[in-house]
Amino acid sequence: MPDVASSSFTFYTSSNLMELTGQKARHLKEFVEILKIIDGASIFCHTHQAFREFHFAKGIFTNDFAYWAAEAIQEEDLAERLASVDIRDFVDIRSLRERLIEIIEDYLGEKNEIRIAPRGKEFHFCKSISIASRTSHEVWTLSEFRDALKKVGDRSLFYHFFDARLRLERSTNDFSNWIESSLGKPDLAGKIEKLDPYLFTLDGIRERMMELIDEELRSESIDEMLKDRTLGVISKMKAARDILSKIFRKKKEDK
Amino acid sequence: MTVRLSDYARIVGPGVIEEIELLARKVRGRRMKMVNSTAVGGGVAEMLAKTVPIFNELGIETKWDVIKGADSFFSVTKSFHNALHGMKVDIKNEMFDIFREFNEMNAREMTFDEDLIVIHDPQPAGLIEKKAEGKGKWVWRCHIDVSHPDMRVWDFLKQYIEKYDGSIFSSPSFAKTLPIPQFLIYPAIDPLSDKNRELPSYTVDRVLKKYNIPGNKPIITQISRFDRLKDPTGVIEAYKIAKRHVDCRLILAGGGATDDPEAGDVLARVKERAGDDPDVHILTLPPFSDLEINALQRASDVIIQKSIREGFGLTVSEGLWKGKPVIGSAVGGIPLQIKHNLTGALVYSIEGCAYQIRYLLSNPDFATKLGTWGKELIREKFLITRIVRNYILMLIALDKPGESIIEI
């Protein structure tokens, strides 16, 4: 019998609609001032949309801020610093915002002059509206989870990996959270949490997760088999013991 | 032949279609109305003709109405259009009166009892005055670049726009300071249209033969009307520089006679610049040459869009969709589609364009990679199914203004 979770997992999918904020920055000083006050949905959008749109070119695009710094104002040094921000280190938008501001302000402190983006290359702040809806996939066991994982779309993976952490402020991705808390498999949960979603394509993450789950299911079935065998041996031993005790009892009575 | 949403599944994947159907179920039964100023011709009418049947198929009852006008009205709206694009136009007070008069006339003849009314472009924007008569939400869909408008026309238009519940723009750089939400919905191409669908190689060969284009050299192509802003002479210069290093053939193909008085002059200059080079093919294509354009793009090794100014640049999307390496100028919406050295090559000058032609023709593996990734970006962002999804999402988002995570 496979382990049944204490509560089920329902796959959601999310669709994004982009909204323009009308805020634009021509240089870094303007940029950092807007960054301080802009809606958190804008920070999420610019740190994640490139990943979503360029998922076929894994790891090449990191975030819109870094791209703008490199392409529009040719601040390659800053671009590298912004690109290296590991979004997994942050559990909410507030702390991510603070880190981005810190990097830019430190950089501005090192510079005597700032570059102005040419007309048409200003940074336009957008924000994303996530519309999350339940899919028909509700699962109770790891094996059901695996089957559903194979079927759901990329947007579902995106929602449970990215939206869940930063926008809904959960400390881990949704998959690891359920696998640990409801299925009681902290090792597998930890391995999935360690996957770097920023370096894999969404399909790559899916494949890697499937491999990890398959390994877990294989070891579960070996355990199950060993358990069956052990139980078999024990019951045979019990039967042998019963027979032997009967024989001993009979011999005793005969004496 | 009626195209159904499911026909796109083999292109965008079943997951995308399922997602659209799932979202549409949440707004099934809603009624929507699209209003624009022309039933045929132009990108807006083309987009509406493709998407309205799909909305209806999804259970969102959608009507498409076209406003009526006279020459005086369309002359005014043409001037407004140019002024909003930033061109210098002589705007007179009576133009505003004509605009109001025709909008009021149309408003009297139309009804608006739908749940969502989408008004396309400035011409029918004044219909918003009817908003109070119904319960529906009103959205203004702006298809033009209003980033540097003539302020007199923009301020006039803005008094109407501010009364809407939302607006839609085609690029982040077109955003304005407005008190209403501004949604971003990129234009898109239809992968099943004659201009973009897969073609058998014999069709491509037939079109090359029709225009006497031998297939013995690499082909570079720019498809654009003969307009100074598309810089066809600049393309010839770039070709000439590149040809000193790599042998190739150039096709410049565009629409023929238009109402653009400069078109004849530009074409004459292009022919003069091309001289008697037998490897330069200047083609003036008649209307409805979509299949020919498709074939010429598919026959090309490199596609160019060396515009000096550009709107969104859907010709770039079309080129990328053919899986070809595209060289585009960094103007208008082209940088949204071409990320340099990832989904194409962005250039700023004739010399830059010439260098990229040389480089891409000499490095076919790299050129193939740009073409492959360019096509994937179009699949992700610039196909018509994404417009359908965006409209459904907007219907949902308008119910919950100000919320950034909506669970349905």
Image (cartoon, coloured by chain):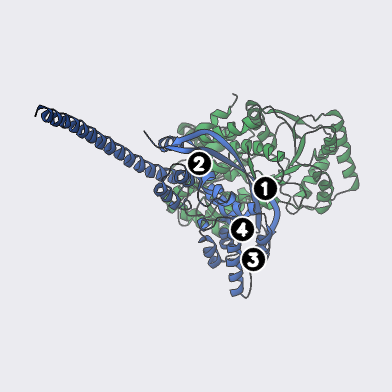
Chain colours: A blue, B green
Front in this rendered view, residue A172 or B155: A172
Where residue A148 appears, as percent x and y from the top left, is: 46, 35
Where residue B207 appears, as percent x and y from the top left, is: 52, 34
Where residue A78 appears, as percent x and y from the top left, is: 55, 66
Residue ID for mark 4 = A94
Quadrant where the C terminus of chain B sits is top right
- Which residue is drawn at the image coordinates 64% and 32% (left, top)? B26
Residue ID for mark 1 = A19
Label 2 crowd bin: few (<14), some (14–19), many (20+), radius 10 Å:
many
Taking B299 as reference, is A45 left or right? right
Q: Secondary structure at mark 4?
A: helix
Q: CA distance from mark 3 to mark 4?
A: 20 Å
Q: Which mark is residue B10?
A: none
Label 3 crowd bin: few (<14), some (14–19), many (20+), radius 10 Å:
many
Are the residues flagged by discs 1 and 4 from a single subunit?
Answer: yes
Taking B61 as reference, is B106 left or right? right
Q: Secondary structure at mark 1?
A: strand
Q: Name the subunit of mark 4.
A: A
